[in-house]
């Protein structure tokens, strides 16, 4: 009797094991919801190159492009056309989450219409001024802003309600200034905004730290604060956080991947486990660093929870800033 | 002469056997891609980017290949513009205005050869300007703020108003339709969705290429179908015309002026070949007024101007990308992405830290342009024979290519439906005697004008005085005023005589 039980147990274990590994991606694909060359392309390269270096996939991962609305077109496509395609990861960023929070991802779609499965890494917001600007610390800048907020021009690479705008609004909120009073100029992409900073058209640029490497090395900009929870490592270690200068302004740009809302649990577990394995390998870590991202590893249920929490926070923020009712 | 040393280094990179082969392959593939209606330089570079990356080329070689495809496609774009009235991308729209009438007169070979020669001088001129003034120009480009852009766009619009001179009202209506299309999408000033009808494909606004191809290619096909139904299909005479020395002499000043205009506009961040060629065309039309002006009916000056200008601005837009890391056009934005993929940060330090990349690319552009001219002139006879294809074969081919081209942009069938709707709309406009170029330019210029006007006003806090804040704005404002008033005064003067 005992042996029979044991055999049964063993069989059921084998059964469970085979059920868990039943899913195998035939045509692993990463959909970059933008034109080639941008941040989403980069996000997809992290998973395709990283997984290849870590020897995690039998077939090479293809990268497809589906541009439109910071990911809105891809989000709608996945939801309407193939919500159960377990082979296709779609890249997302905090920018996508922010638009989801404001209902700009299409009618009736929210953060529950995708299965958030893994991250590629993070970048952080940074408050930047031109290198010959009079402000040496965040405090000096904030004091000047507080004196006359409506004459102080900030500008960045996204429209009102975008990530860059949120960073500016957070800085204003932390300095006790009503974000609605700030004078914000929207440019198309970070490149144009940096040009405007160089040409003295704007005074402050709330951008991302990762993209600034070249300009920092050339000594063209000064970073007053990085909007990270704690000091960064390596070449950015000298830059103080907004927090330690007494301002509660934090902005983490997450880059990661989701699957369609009706993808099976097996497929979801399959990818979640792949990410867990990848995070342990040097090949993946090296890829993340090469693409200018900082480590931030989260997968499966914990990421799902994180994303939903973050979207909720963004919704609150958008409400206080008067972007949504 | 430090610059010459650098350029010599550049040539040693560009003339290395593999890079030389790549630039030739790039130019050839680019010409082929560009000659397909609907597939322009942006798609060409975007399609080949992953390939160049996967082949594991060193960064300078990959960039040289992609740049070859870029200007090869600029060259190739004129073929369908001139022979079929279907521009490959927004930069080639102005080429249709005088190129297509020339082809219909049986001067297709002459038109193609002239545009090849003008393009060659346009890009060579621009490259020499890059070599001479690279550091200076990158400083100047940054000084160009929102209010300067507002005036530049206003100037472009005034040039446009007289572009299709005999029908100013219809031109204006065409521009307004373009402006209306430009308002679709997320408004960056307030973050509000405008006229998107909850269709996510409209969130980023309407894509230029879908509008260009829909309005030109699809309506052209409908026009051909109509004449087939009426049984009055006319074969365009192929002709054996070619360029003569006197043609080149006749357009030498046109080419020189247009090169300068195209180059300056190309260098400015955010403006590309479409705006450069429109301003050059408008300016030349002004210059030609009274001097047996045949613009719009197959004037060689009207062909040489946009062709020199669009190539000059294609070369010019490389400059802010390399020196500042700011792309001057959609295609250079993709090239910028390519650089980043190779872990090269374009910007102020690129010329100092990695001169082999920056100067190798510039030198390869000299080589590539020469190669394009040599490669293209003998092929013209073959291209022209495209016209001798029976229309019953030609129409399905155009339709197929445009559908593939448009689908390749977003990979979404929505664009195909939208393209057909626009094509039918454009067909109706053509039947009513409207010209389509103003619509497209309204769309391109309108978006830039609106963005910059609002930027300027939010910088100044609503004070319109910012539009007259410096020497550049005032100069441009005066130029606009002159362009607006001059034709009326000239007319008066003529009458007085």
Image (cartoon, rainbow, N blue to C red):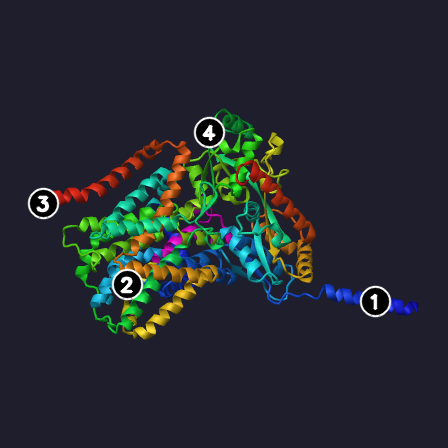
Using the image, name the chain to which the residue with label 1 belongs.
A
Q: Nearer the viewer, residue A179 or B116?
A: A179
- State if disc 3 and disc 1 touch (CB < 8 Å): no
Image spot of residue B250 (x, y percent): 18, 56
- State if disc 3 and disc 2 touch (CB < 8 Å): no
Q: Which quadrant would the N terminus of chain B be assigned to in this image? A: top left
* Precedes in sequence: disc 4 or disc 1: 1
Identify the secondary structure beneath mark 3: helix
Outermost top residue: A147
* Precedes in sequence: disc 2 or disc 3: 2
Give the residue pinned by disc 3: B495
Q: Which residues are magenta?
A: B338-367
Q: Are marks 1 and 3 on the same chain?
A: no
Picture quarter containing residue B30?
Answer: bottom left
Q: Nearer the viewer, mark 4 or mark 2?
A: 4
Q: Which mark is residue A150?
A: 4
Give the residue pinned by disc 2: B82
Image spot of residue B344 (x, y percent): 49, 50
Give the residue pinned by disc 1: A10
Q: Nearer the viewer, residue B202 or B126?
A: B202
| Marks 2/1: CA–CA distance | 75 Å
Q: Are marks 4 and 1 on the same chain?
A: yes
């Amino acid at each position: 009797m005992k042996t029979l039980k044991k055999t049964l147990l063993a069989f059921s274990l084998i059964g469970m094991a085979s059920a868990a590994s039943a899913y195998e991606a035939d045509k692993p694909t990463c959909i970059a919801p933008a034109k080639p060359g941008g941040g989403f392309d980069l996000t997809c390269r992290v998973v395709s190159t990283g997984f290849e270096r870590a020897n995690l996939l039998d077939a090479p991962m293809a990268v497809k492009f589906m541009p439109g609305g910071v990911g809105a077109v891809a989000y709608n496509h996945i939801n309407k056309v193939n919500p159960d395609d377990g082979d296709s990861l779609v890249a997302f960023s905090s920018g996508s989450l922010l638009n989801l929070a404001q209902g700009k991802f299409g009618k009736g779609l929210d953060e529950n219409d995708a299965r958030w499965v893994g991250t590629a890494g993070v970048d952080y917001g940074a408050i930047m001024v031109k290198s010959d600007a009079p402000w040496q610390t965040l405090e000096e800048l904030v004091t000047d802003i507080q004196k006359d907020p409506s004459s102080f021009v900030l500008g960045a690479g996204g429209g009102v309600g975008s990530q860059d705008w949120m960073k500016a609004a957070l800085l204003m909120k932390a300095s006790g200034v009503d974000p609605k009073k700030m004078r914000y100029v929207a440019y198309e992409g970070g490149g144009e905004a940096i040009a405007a900073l160089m040409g003295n058209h704007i005074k402050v640029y709330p951008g991302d730290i990762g993209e600034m490497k070249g300009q920092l090395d050339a000594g063209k900009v000064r970073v007053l604060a990085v909007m990270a929870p704690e000091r960064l490592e390596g070449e950015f270690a000298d830059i103080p956080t907004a927090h330690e200068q007494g301002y509660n302004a934090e902005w983490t740009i997450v880059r990661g991947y989701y699957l369609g809302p009706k993808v099976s649990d097996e497929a979801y577990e399959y990818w979640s486990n792949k990410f867990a394995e990848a995070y342990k390998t040097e090949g993946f870590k090296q890829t993340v660093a090469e693409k200018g991202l900082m480590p931030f590893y989260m997968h499966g249920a914990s990421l799902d929870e994180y994303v939903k929490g973050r979207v909720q926070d963004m919704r609150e923020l958008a409400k206080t800033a008067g972007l949504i009712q | 002469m430090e610059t010459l040393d650098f350029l010599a280094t550049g040539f040693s990179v560009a003339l290395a056997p593999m890079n030389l082969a790549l630039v030739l392959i790039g130019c050839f593939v680019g010409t082929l891609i560009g000659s397909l209606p609907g597939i322009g330089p942006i798609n060409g570079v975007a399609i080949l980017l992953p390939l160049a990356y996967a082949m594991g080329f060193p960064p300078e070689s990959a960039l040289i290949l992609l740049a070859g495809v870029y200007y090869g496609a600029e060259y190739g774009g004129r073929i369908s513009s001139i022979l079929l009235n279907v521009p490959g991308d927004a930069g080639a729209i102005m080429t249709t205005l005088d190129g297509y009438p020339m082809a219909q007169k049986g001067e297709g070979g002459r038109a193609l050869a002239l545009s090849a020669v003008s393009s060659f001088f346009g890009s060579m001129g621009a490259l020499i300007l890059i070599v001479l003034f690279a550091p200076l120009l990158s400083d100047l480009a940054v000084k160009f703020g929102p209010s300067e852009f507002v005036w530049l766009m206003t100037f472009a619009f005034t040039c446009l108003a007289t572009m299709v001179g005999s029908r100013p009202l219809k031109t204006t209506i065409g521009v307004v339709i373009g402006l209306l299309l430009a308002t679709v999408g997320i408004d960056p000033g307030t973050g509000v969705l405008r006229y998107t009808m909850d269709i996510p494909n409209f969130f980023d606004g309407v894509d230029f290429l879908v509008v260009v191809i829909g309005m030109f290619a699809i309506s052209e096909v409908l026009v051909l179908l109509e004449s087939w139904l009426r049984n009055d299909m006319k074969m365009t005479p192929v002709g054996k015309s070619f360029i003569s020395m006197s043609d080149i002499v006749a357009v030498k000043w046109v080419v020189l002026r247009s090169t300068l205009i195209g180059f300056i506009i190309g260098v400015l961040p955010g403006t590309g070949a479409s705006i450069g060629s429109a301003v050059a065309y408008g300016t030349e039309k002004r210059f030609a007024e009274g001097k047996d002006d045949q613009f719009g009916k197959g004037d060689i000056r009207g062909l040489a101007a946009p062709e020199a200008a669009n190539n000059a601005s294609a070369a010019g837009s490389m400059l802010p990308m390399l020196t500042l890391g700011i792309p001057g056009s959609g295609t250079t934005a993709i090239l910028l992405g390519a650089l980043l993929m190779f872990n090269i940060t374009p910007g102020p330090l690129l010329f100092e830290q990695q001169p082999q990349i920056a100067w190798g690319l510039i030198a390869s552009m000299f080589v590539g342009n020469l190669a394009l001219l040599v490669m293209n002139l003998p092929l013209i006879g073959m291209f022209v024979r495209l016209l001798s294809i029976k229309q019953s074969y030609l129409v399905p081919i155009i339709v197929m290519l445009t559908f593939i081209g448009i689908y390749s942009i977003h990979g979404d069938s929505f664009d195909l439906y939208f393209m057909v709707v626009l094509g039918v709309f454009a067909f109706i406009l053509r039947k009513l005697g409207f010209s389509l170029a103003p619509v497209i330019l309204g769309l391109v210029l309108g978006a830039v004008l609106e963005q910059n006007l609002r930027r300027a006003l939010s910088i100044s806090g609503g004070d319109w005085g910012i539009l007259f804040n410096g020497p550049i704005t005032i100069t441009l404002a005066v130029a606009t005023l002159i362009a607006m008033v001059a034709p009326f005064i000239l007319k008066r003067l003529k009458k007085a005589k």
